[in-house]
Every structure is written in C-alpha cells, then in structure tokens.
Amino acid sequence: MDYKKLSEILFPNIKESISYYENEVFPVRNLKPEAKVTRLAPSPTGFIHLGNLYGAFVDERLAHQSEGVFMLRIEDTDDKRKVEGAVETIISSLEYFGLKFDEGVCIEGEIGNYGPYFQSNRGKIYQCVAKYLVENGRAYPCFCTEEELEETRKKQSEENVNTGYYGKWAKDRNLTVEEVQAHLDNNEEFVIRFKSYGTEEGTFEIDDAIRGHLVIHENYQDIVILKTNGIPTYHFAHVVDDHLMRVTHVVRGEEWLSTLPIHYEIFKTLGWNTPIYCHTAHLMKMDNGAKRKLSKRKDPELGLGFYMDLGYHPSAVREYLLTILNSNYEEWRIANPDSLIDNFEFTLEKMSNSGALFDLDKLNNISKDVLLKISAEEICEFLLNWSEGHKTEITQVLNDNKDAVIKLLSVGRNGDKPRKDLMYCEQIFEFISYFFDEYFSIVDKYPENVNDEEVKKLLKAYLNTYDHNDDQSQWFDKIRVISGENGYAAKPKDYKKNPEMYKGHVGDVSSVIRMAIVGRASSPDVWELQQIMGETKVRSRIEKAINN
RNA sequence: GACUCAUUGGUCAAGUGGUCAAGACGCCACCCUCUCACGGUGGAAUCAGGGGUUCGACUCCCCUAUGGGUUACCA
C-alpha cells in the first residue's frame, strides 16, 4: 500500500512538515519549568454560564500562579453553532469577572506567537498533521454517506454490538489507492478518519490531576479527524492545537472523560506527550428534587448575565466560585480576611470530583462580606454603572443624590460590628429606595397593638418635640418620654416584667416613627437616616402620615 | 442498552483503617437590643443500602440503588 501516494492525492497542497511547525513556527515556550500554560477554548455560541466561569477560573489560577500563560482559543470548527458577536461577549464577560487572557483572541484581534487562535484559521496546520498520519498509514479517507453510517449503526444495535466505525464495520479502512482515486474521480465527498490500533479489551493508564490515577479502555474507533469541509473535529483539533500551542494543562469538563482514549491514542500515535488533564466536575442545579448538570438551554438564569442583571459584584461571584473550587478556600479566607485572592494557593488536588450544587444563599452571604470591604463611594459608583446598563430609570435619581446615597450606604457600616445589609445592586437600591420620594411607600404594617388613632397621636407628639439638632441620645430620650406619657414602657424590660401594665413598649413607638419615615418596620438607625434625609423631608413624611 | 464517573447533615464540604465524624451557609433557640441587621452562645441535622476484608471501617474490595456523563462529519 502506497500511503505516500495516497497522502499526496489527498493533500496535494500541503508541503510543510510537522517538524517545520514544531521547530520553526511554534517552538517550545521559553518559560520557567514550573510555569503552566492553560487555555480556555469555548465555541462561539455566545453563551457563558457559571460553569464555564468555574472552569475558566481553574485555567486562570493555574497559569497566573505559576507565571505561565492563560490563553483564549476559539473553537469555531462547527459553523452551525457560530453566533455573531459571541467572541466579544465571551471576552467581556470574563473580563468583568476579573479573568484576563495573556494570549490568544482579544477584542483587537489576536496576540501571541502561537496563533492563529481561531481554529477555523488553522486549516493548513491540521491538514499537515492529517497528511502525516495518512502517509504513515494511520489515517484514511472514508466515503461513507450518512445513510450508510446510519444503517451500520442500526445493524450493530440489532446484533447487540457496540456502535461505531471500527473493525469489520470500517468499510473504507483498507481502500486501495486506486479505489480512493475512483471515488475521488466520482466527485464523492469524504472525511479523513483516524486508523485506530486499539482493541475493545485493551486498557491504558493515565493520571488526571483532579481525578487521580485512571485505568481506562483503549479507543478502538476510527473516529473522524477531518470533516467533509476539511475542518477538524474537536478531538483532532484538541490534540494538534494543545501540542503546538505548548499547552501544559488541559482543564475541561468531565464530559470529556469518555473521549480521553481517543485523544490519548492520537497523541501517542504522533509521538507526542499528553498534556496534564484536569477533568472538572460539573456544576449542578436542583431540578424537581434531582441534581442536574447546568444546561445552556434550560438554565438561562444561570448565565453570567443573571449575576450582571441583579448586580452582583464580580468579586463576590469570584469569591463564591473559589469556595466551591477549592475546599480549603473558606478557611483560608477566614484566617486571611484582607488578603488578596492571589495569595491563596490554589491546588488541583483540593478540587472536588463530584458536582456541586449552586447555592444562592451562600453567594448572598459571601456577597455581604465582600461588599463590606468595599467603600461606600465605590459601591455607589458600582450601583450607578449597574443602573446605566440594567435599570436606566433610576440612574438619574441616583446621580442627583450621590452624596446622600453614599451616606445611606454607610449607615452602620463602621465599628467592630458593622452591618452587612448589602448584597447586590437590585437589592441595594431597594434597600435605600425609601429615601427617594418617588420610590417611597408604606410597605409594612404598623405594630398590631397600636391602632390608627394611636399612631396619629404618637406621631403628633413626636413632631411637636422633634428637634433636628438633637443628638442621637437626646433624640431617643424624647421617644422614651413620649412612650411613657402614652402608656408604653420606656424600657422593654419593664414591659416584659409587667406586660399588663402597658400598651406596649418604646419599641412599638419607635416602630411607628420608623414606619412614617421609611415606610418599613425595619431599617438601620432612624436618627442617622433622618440626618441624611434632612429636616424638611422628615417633617413632611410625618405630616403626611398624620394626615393620611 | 453499552461504557464510564460520582455518592459524608437541606447545601458546600474536611476526612485517606482507630476522630465524641471539622468548618461554612441555611434553619431553630437564647443573649445583646428601640426594629432590622451585626455579633455572641447553644441546638437539630450526615457517612445511600447490602455483603465481605480486618481486632477495628466514612476510609479497602464486591454487588445493588440513585445521580451525572458519553455513545455525531457538536463542542
């Protein structure tokens, strides 16, 4: 069999050799020995969800912690799935969450010496490698039509054997050069298939950085490496690109575990070393009481847009992701509350190999702590930016009241036991919305033990004694007095001792005042809020409540 | 169906043959307290089931169950 001739017939235009690419175009990188080279290789569907971000984080940490390279390669080998503007979306969403690429596709084009970074532009490289395989009898053209393949599959399942293109089912595996030529002359379309030497019984061993030592079945399928249109399949592109781009660690979802044998065999056939594989567990979602993998189609709410829309601060999402990424992160954070994430030593060994359920409660809790470390000025800025993109109707009002907003956000945030009220923009705005007359409303109920008439009476008394210049304790002393004069215990403890002697206690009275001023039964310190609102607004709110 | 990965409280999880089975979120109670938060103290709650191996199993082996994944000229 003249494989050389076959390869020339199939790839007449390919003159380069693999060694040309290996030695001259993409030489071994000049990095520290421990430096890791990782890549994010999304397909340009334009949709990134939390799971993608989770994986990207692993790549990023690995590379940047070792002074290596983190690159973006776009796997656009399936033209059916291309979406306009997807690449920009990918880059900007990752950047929003603090992930920056050192190399590869970027907004301006591409940077780095190992490109092109769009797989669709690497055709010649793949063909060169494919040609080499044909030349060595390890790849061949296959002219089978989809219908023929479908038929084989049917037969195979009837016979209860594994489906696929292998062994005696691989019809075109041993076509002669003449037969190939005849098909070609007939203008038939063809794919290039890899000729596997594996068996169904064979196994091999490989170490996965997350899953440990694996013993797995060999590949025995003659899988397609070049499609009819000359574009490679993922399997082939992965091997060629990650080798030539000198990637050291391949981080990908566990759905790739089952195709690892294919990749392994191609690597070995080409005489190349495999990268270190890191198969991550999927992020799961609770669905009707059952855990389920996060899905692009079913869970749009878990797209990154979800967090952006609600206005979660990117560092809160990062922080949350890190806690599920590395099990020792939380403890490290407790021990090092002010340390930069870069100081945490991320390790693959500490990664879980079972799927974690997304936990919104936890995110919210983390977010509170994260926002507490950010100044009120910055949060205000963040809120403003968010409103411009997601809630334009409040931008104006925020802009007009910047100083007040900053003060509102600051209430109770200082001292040993700062408040942790803020979680995400939508919630933050809602939290301070009472300040703005156009958003103020009575959302809660007055205390049950105080009827409407009583409310008015108390508020009148409050208004009469109100002095905007009172300090906090003077102010509250007055409320205690009003309480006493109206049959409410000035101290809650007195009420607890003899509840029958009072209508209620000072807490009820201050609740009435709070309701009139902020429209809610609970809020941060009312005196401080009044100082921010100013006397006019305070008085008018109370008057309104009285006249209601 | 075949092949494969996984399985510790509601959730995230530590744990690598001998622990009263950490910690965090959530939940509950109490304390602090003018409300709510914050903070503090305490509490309920877990090794999927069954067989082995062993003096001893959450830890090792087998089976079952459940869940995930793959089974394309998608990635």
Image (cartoon, coloured by chain):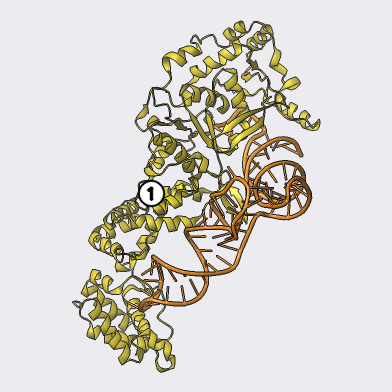
| Vertical relation: A297 (above or below) A41 | below
Q: Is A93 on the left or on the right of A467, as rendered? A: right
Chain of residue at mark 1 = A
Q: What element carries label 1?
A: helix
Image quadrant occupied by the C terminus of chain A: bottom left
Say whether residue A504 is visible.
Answer: no
Q: Which residue is drawn at 24% across and 59% down?
A: A402
Q: Residue at x 49, y 25 (%)?
A: A242
Q: Quadrant of residue A178?
A: top right
Question: What is the residue that sits farthest to the left in this orientation?
Answer: A469
Q: Name the spot of residue A529 as percent of width and height, x first.
A: 28, 70
Front-lying residue, A355 or A513: A355
The chain shown in yellow is which? A
Per the image, the residue denoted by label 1 is A315
| Vertical relation: A280 (above or below) A307 | above
Q: Which residue is drawn at 37% across and 83% down?
A: A508
Q: Is B53 on the left or on the right of A510, as rendered? A: right
The chain shown in orange is which? B
Q: Which residue is drawn at 42% across and 47% down?
A: A318
Say whether residue A245 is visible.
Answer: yes
Q: What residue type is labelled 1?
A: Ser
Front-lying residue, A63 or A77: A63
Front-lying residue, A122 or A65: A65
